[in-house]
C-alpha cells in the first residue's frame, strides 16, 4: 500500500458543500485539499495549472454540469461525483467515475468512496510503478529513438516518436503514448534533462511535450495529440526559440 497523500480538488457551486467535504477530508491522513472551485470554467483553468489526484465533483452546477465537465477532460484524475439526485448514477459510472455520493453526504459513506479511490490509486501505482530508484530513467536509458523504462519487473522499450507528452504526477511522471500511459517514479527535471537534445520541450512545470504532436498553439495553452496542455509564462521564450516562432 502506498503512503502518498492524494491532492484533492472540490468542485461545487454551494459553499456549504465545500465545508462538509473539507471537514471530512481533514479526518483522512492521505487526503489534502489543494483547491476549491465553484463552477466548471474555474475548474478547467485550475487543472491547467495544477494537476490533482482526486476531484470531488458536483453534478448540478449552472451553465455546465459536472458530467458535462467530466466529458471535456482528456485525462481526468480519480473522480467522486456528489449530487442531491440519483438519476445520473448510470451515466456517471459509464464515464468511469470512482464513486457517486448522494447529498447530504454521511461521513461513513464518504469514507467508503475515498477508500475506493485510494485502492484504485494504489493498484495503478503497483501495476505501472518503476519500483527501484536504480531503474529510474537516466541518460544511459535514453537512446536516439527510445526510452528504456522498467515497470513491474519488466523493461519496456518506449519509442520517443510514440510519446505525445510527459506529465508530472506528484512524485512520479506519466508518459502518455499512443497505446497507453506509463506511471513511473521519476522527476520532471531528470527526464527533461535526458530528452533535452530531442524533439521534446518543457512548456510548463508539469508538462514536457513532443513537438511533433503539437497541433496548435494559443496564448497560454497548446493542443498536443488532441489534449490541451498549459503553457507556463517562464517557458514561452524557449518554446518560441525551439519552434522558431515570432
Image: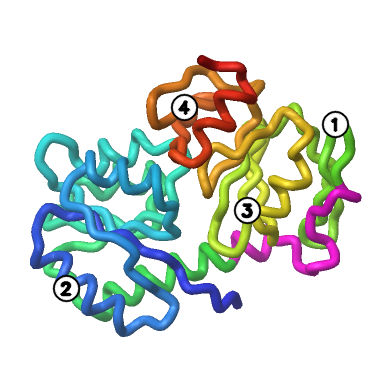
Mark 2 lies on a secondary structure that is helix
The local crowd at label 4, few if under 14, some if 14 to 19, many if 20 or more residues have their Cα within 10 Å, is: some
**Residue found 29% across the figure and 60% down from its top:** 35
The local crowd at label 3, few if under 14, some if 14 to 19, many if 20 or more residues have their Cα within 10 Å, is: many
Callout in the foreground (2, 1): 1
Start-end of magenta stretch: 123-141
Q: Position of residue 72 (x, y in %)?
A: 35, 34
Mark 3 lies on a secondary structure that is strand
Mark 4 in CB contact with mark 1 (< 8 angstroms): no
**Which one is earlier in the sequence, the residue at label 4 or at label 1?**
1
**Which one is earlier in the sequence, the residue at label 4 or at label 3?**
3
- Judging by the rendered image, the residue that carries numbered circle 2 is 20
Callout in the foreground (3, 2): 3
The colouring scheme, among rainbow, by chain, secondary structure or one colour, is rainbow
* Label 2 to label 1: alpha-carbon separation: 50 Å
Residue 176 is tagged as: none
**Which one is earlier in the sequence, the residue at label 1 or at label 3?**
1
**Residue found 12% across the figure and 53% down from its top:** 13
The local crowd at label 1, few if under 14, some if 14 to 19, many if 20 or more residues have their Cα within 10 Å, is: few
**Which one is earlier in the sequence, the residue at label 2 or at label 1?**
2
**Residue found 78% across the figure and 61% down from its top:** 152
Q: Position of residue 102 (x, y in %)?
A: 18, 62
Left or right: residue 137 versus residue 118 is right
Mark 1 lies on a secondary structure that is loop
**Which one is earlier in the sequence, the residue at label 3 or at label 2?**
2
The local crowd at label 2, few if under 14, some if 14 to 19, many if 20 or more residues have their Cα within 10 Å, is: some
- Judging by the rendered image, the residue that carries numbered circle 3 is 173
- Judging by the rendered image, the residue that carries numbered circle 4 is 222
| Residue 98 is inside the magenta segment | no
Name the magenta segment's main secondary structure.
helix
Q: Where on the picture, by quarter, is residue 40? A: top left
- Judging by the rendered image, the residue that carries numbered circle 1 is 145
Amino acid at each position: 500500500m502506498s503512503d502518498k497523500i492524494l491532492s484533492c480538488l472540490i468542485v461545487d457551486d454551494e459553499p456549504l458543500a465545500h465545508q462538509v467535504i473539507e471537514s471530512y477530508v481533514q479526518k483522512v491522513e492521505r487526503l489534502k485539499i489543494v483547491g476549491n472551485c465553484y463552477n466548471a470554467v474555474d475548474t478547467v483553468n485550475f487543472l491547467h495549472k495544477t494537476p490533482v489526484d482526486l476531484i470531488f465533483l458536483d453534478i448540478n452546477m449552472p451553465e455546465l454540469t459536472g458530467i458535462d465537465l467530466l466529458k471535456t477532460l482528456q485525462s481526468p484524475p480519480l473522480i467522486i461525483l456528489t449530487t442531491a439526485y440519483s438519476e445520473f448514477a448510470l451515466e456517471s459510472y459509464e464515464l468511469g467515475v470512482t464513486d457517486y455520493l448522494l447529498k447530504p453526504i454521511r461521513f461513513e459513506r464518504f469514507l467508503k468512496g475515498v477508500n475506493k479511490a485510494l485502492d484504485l490509486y494504489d493498484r495503478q501505482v503497483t501495476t505501472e510503478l518503476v519500483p527501484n530508484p536504480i531503474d529510474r530513467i537516466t541518460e544511459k536509458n535514453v537512446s536516439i529513438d527510445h526510452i528504456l523504462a522498467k515497470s513491474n519487473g519488466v523493461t519496456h522499450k518506449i519509442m520517443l516518436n510514440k510519446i505525445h507528452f510527459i506529465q508530472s504526477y506528484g512524485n512520479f511522471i506519466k508518459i502518455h503514448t499512443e497505446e497507453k500511459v506509463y506511471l513511473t517514479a521519476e522527476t520532471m527535471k531528470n527526464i527533461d534533462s535526458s530528452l533535452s537534445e530531442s524533439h521534446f520541450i518543457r512548456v510548463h512545470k508539469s508538462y514536457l511535450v513532443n513537438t511533433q504532436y503539437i497541433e496548435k498553439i494559443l496564448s497560454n495553452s497548446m493542443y498536443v495529440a488532441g489534449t490541451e496542455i498549459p503553457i507556463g509564462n517562464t517557458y514561452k521564450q524557449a518554446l518560441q526559440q525551439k519552434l522558431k516562432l515570432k
